[in-house]
Image: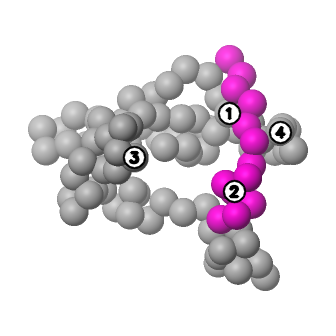
Amino acid sequence: MKVARFFPEENIPKDADGNNLWEKREGLLIPENQPQEIKLETYDCKNFDVEKGLCKNYENRPDICRNSGCVDKSSPESEEEQFKKLSEQKFIKIG
């Protein structure tokens, strides 16, 4: 999961026992074409099956996972165009 830098700890989703579902990775990601504008923190989700590329608890996933899109509703570009740009975006790891 990629989120804006300084993502509030209290917004990290919890499991049924109250433990964080996400584990923070070291370093930050910055887009190659906008290195001064955006810095992202990255997390690994304990419910993400890396081999299958799917959530292990899809039906009960937290709201942030249901609503995590980087689509700007006010953009003149379609959602498809925005997703295409995001998927083609190259990042550099720093730190």
* Callout 3 secondary element: loop
**Looking at the image, which is closer to me, 55 or 70?**
55
* Callout 1 secondary element: strand
Asked whether the beta carbons under mark 4 and mark 2 sit within 8 Å of each other, the answer is: no
Residue that mark 2 sits on: 86
How far, Cα to Cα, is label 2 from label 3? Answer: 18 Å
Badge 3 amino acid: Gly
Residue 43's place in the image compared with 69, above or below, is above
Residue extending farthest to the top is 95
**Looking at the image, which is closer to me, 1 or 49?**
49
**In this rendering, would 32 be left or right of 91?**
right
Residues rendered magenta in the picture:
83-95
Sequence-earlier tag: 4 or 2: 4
**In this rendering, would 40 be left or right of 66?**
right
Residue that mark 4 sits on: 32
Asked whether the beta carbons under mark 2 and mark 3 sit within 8 Å of each other, the answer is: no
**Image quadrant in which you'd find residue 49:** top left
**In this rendering, would 50 be left or right of 69?**
left
Of circles 2 and 3, the one toward us is 3
How far, Cα to Cα, is label 2 from label 1? Answer: 14 Å
The disc at residue 29 is 1
Residue 68 on image: x %, y %? 48, 60
Q: Can residue 51 be spotted in the picture?
A: yes
Confirm whether the magenta stretch covers residue 39: no
Badge 1 amino acid: Leu
Asked whether the beta carbons under mark 4 and mark 3 sit within 8 Å of each other, the answer is: no
Residue that mark 3 sits on: 53
Assess disc 2: are there few (<14), some (14-19) or many (≥20) residues with their C-alpha within 10 Å of its C-alpha: few
How far, Cα to Cα, is label 1 from label 4? Answer: 9 Å
**Looking at the image, which is closer to me, 81 or 94?**
81
